[in-house]
Amino acid sequence: MSFLKKGSKSYSIFYLQCPRCQEESMFETGSWSFKKSFDMRERCSKCNLNYNPEPGYYYGAMFISYIWTAWFCLLFMGIFFWGLGFPQNTAWAMLITFMVVNFVYIFRISRLMWININVRFDPNAIQKYGPAH
């Protein structure tokens, strides 16, 4: 599936990899870990990309998260309540459970979407920008 091949922005976003070299996760813990959920690495240990280039850099990710979550919730309720005929309370309970379990992943994907707007994949990034430089 070329959509999720290494070198694509979608690979970086969905696998939470450094957008420049795609060799290391931007986060210290796994996606469904509630320990250190929001802690990002300061820099990529492979290509030395600064993950926090300026204070407030990720404010835009907040809007991406809000829009992405709102559309997902509308689609989810549309499918389960209107499409499949689940009772409204059941559909809401399922949605809330899903969102609680996946909140950290949604937060992380939003940050990756934001940083991928400004950083391009470079297959030679480790040699060009690596920690030795």
Image (cartoon, helix red, strand yellow):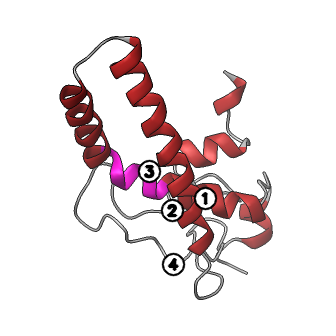
**Which callout, 2 or 1, points at the residue further toward the start of the chain?**
1
Three-letter amino acid code at disc 4? Glu
In this view of the protein, which residue sits in the foreground, 108 or 22?
108
Badge 4 vs badge 2, beta-carbon distance below 8 Å: no
Q: Secondary structure at mark 4?
A: loop
Q: Residues within 10 Å of mark 3 (few under 14, many from 20)?
A: some
Percent coordinates x, y for residue 35 in the rendering: 22, 64
Q: Residue at x 64, y 74 (%)?
A: 48
Percent coordinates x, y for residue 52 in the rendering: 59, 79
Percent coordinates x, y for residue 53 in the rendering: 65, 82
Q: CA distance from mark 4 to mark 3?
A: 20 Å
In this view of the protein, which residue sits in the foreground, 53 or 17?
53
Three-letter amino acid code at disc 2? Met
Q: Residues within 10 Å of mark 1 (few under 14, many from 20)?
A: many
Residue beneath disc 4? 42
Badge 2 vs badge 3, beta-carbon distance below 8 Å: no
Q: Residue at x 73, y 41 (%)?
A: 8
**Which callout, 2 or 3, points at the residue further toward the start of the chain?**
2
> Can residue 15 be seen?
no
Q: CA distance from mark 2 to mark 1?
A: 6 Å
